[in-house]
Image (spheres, grey):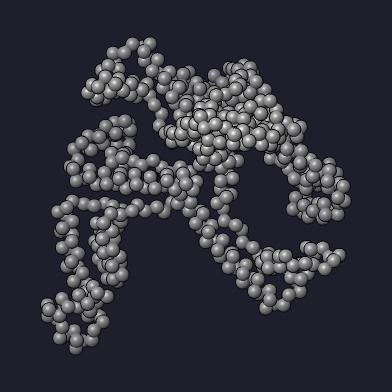
Amino acid sequence: MSTKKSRSKSKSPKRSSQKSTSVYDEEQMDEILENITLKRPRTGYTHFFMEEVEKYKSKNKNKKFSLQEIAKEFAEKWKSLPDSKKEAYNEKFKEERMKYKGEIELVRHYLFKDYNDIVRRPPTAYRIYLNEKLCEGFEKNLDPKEVKAKASKDWKMMDEDKRREYIDKKTENDTWFKKAKQTRKVTPLSIFVQKTIQAAKDKNKEVPTIKEIAPAWNKLSAAEKEKYKTYAEDENRDREKLREIYELVNGVKPKRPAGAFRVFLQENAKKKAFSTLKEGRELWEKLSEDEKDVYLKKAHRIRLAYKYKKMIYDKKIKKILPKRPANAYAQFLKEKKGEKIPKGEKAVAYWRDEFDNLKKDQKRKYEDKAARDRERYQKKMEEFKNCVFDLPKRPLNAFSLFVKDRMPDLKQEKPKEETRKLLKQIAKEWKEEDGVSQRKYEKKAEVDKMRFKKQLKDFESLGYYKKNYRAPRNSSTSAKSKKSKRRSRSKSRSSKIKKEEEDEEDYDEEEEEEEEEEKSKRSKKRSTSSNSKKGSKKSKTQDSKRRTSRSSKKSGKSQKKK
């Protein structure tokens, strides 16, 4: 790939909201993407090292060797190489790097051609205009620098009416990015329900319920149901694309790519071409080479898309990773930065000798700095390990939480029973449950929902969120938390109070009547614990004098103040 061609491809891809100037055929795309590997370029030393290893293997075919021993020899050999020979290896690295950058731009242009500024947030009005001009320049093979310079001049001289067009596109893009958060797939029935509700609203009629709509869906003919099925497939395809852009913008960890056989299984499973994996394997083996080649090309395209997503994800994490700690010598070099060295001396050798000749007291100063830097790094790494770089788990509703609690017990009682029947039994139990227990699960669901909102907000702003999230408490729960902290300070506590505190922290509140009884028990326990504390602190003579009810009340008040 020539330098001019690779330069011309440094542009942002288009989005479906902007009118595309060219149409790409599947065959044309396959031809372009077939020779792309997205293999990272190797440095000049790596090229030299690989050549030397091959030479060593050819000379010593039957001899066993370890790469560590050979690496030391080759490193010394590389140092003694003249600059002219080193330059030849470095040229190979430059060529590979140029090719790699060009391949990245090709993948971005062809596989993500519907997306605009995938690495950034929703673009500005000027950025949308610039991207359009860059796309036109890409098709005409123009230099992007010249295109950018011309675009900036044209934008400054542009009328307000023309600018309004790009400002409107910006608002469309903002809403488009918001839609990208939608993850759930739609069904033909859900589309039918939406359309019937919308039709009722348009005619100013009463909005029908799902129970009323269900019979109308059953009366539909097979052809009409098939029509809604195609609507659902198109909608889900669009949502998948939107989801992809959302993941790329926020740096979500991509899933492992599917191979050719797995792609074949996924497509034929929807058609119900086989019932077991063995039957699927047999169908795959019966395919001709041309038929297999179709799936191999699809798998190759998926692999390239995965590599591109992974590259963006790795960049996102590298930005957040804490800097590695500097050792004592590095701390010494930081301090000496900007100082001049004597003429004729090499900087590396000169500063190394200076550091080695330092006194023990002087060296200890830099070693202490390095130790502090290491501690800082370890603390930050602990925080980093506690971060999650994938989307937070969606919150569960009250019934789902009830199922989660009840299912393990039912499976132990009836291990041979089908899951479907067990779920029916749980649904009956849920309906029979009293309002208090249902309210308990509803409160749990609210807390989980708050957790999800907080984590999602952090994820969208930072690209990650922390595991140890605790939901914000309201006034009543905050008062309880203060009481629980006071209780934790006292040494003598009963096991019952401990359980109650844990339940309060997990938001497992019980009935109002039970809470009042528990409060009265706690007040009794507090009075007994305060008396026991008082007895341990005061002398025997003071204890005998202050055994009356009046003195115990005063001591309780003094302890509260403390």
Judge by depth and name the residue closer to the eye, 248 or 76. Answer: 248
Is 352 placed above or below 37 here? below
The answer to whether residue 206 is visible is yes
Residue at the (53%, 59%) spot, across then down? 380
Residue at the (15%, 80%) spot, across then down? 551
Residue 431 appears at what percent x and percent y? 20, 36
Residue 132 appears at what percent x and percent y? 59, 29
- Looking at the image, the residue that sits furthest to the bottom is 541
Residue 560 appears at what percent x and percent y? 23, 73
Judge by depth and name the residue closer to the eye, 531 or 112. Answer: 112
Judge by depth and name the residue closer to the eye, 129 or 507. Answer: 129
Rendering quarter of residue 529:
bottom left
Residue at the (25%, 66%) spot, across then down? 494
Looking at the rendering, in which quadrant would you find the N terminus? top right
* Apparent side of residue 108 relative to residue 55 in the rendered image (left or right): left
The answer to whether residue 38 is visible is no
Residue 498 appears at what percent x and percent y? 28, 62
Rendering quarter of residue 439:
top left
Judge by depth and name the residue closer to the eye, 500 or 379. Answer: 379
Residue at the (29%, 71%) spot, across then down? 491
* Apparent side of residue 86 relative to residue 550 in the rendered image (left or right): right
Looking at the rendering, in which quadrant would you find the C terminus? bottom left
* Apparent side of residue 381 relative to residue 59 in the rendered image (left or right): left
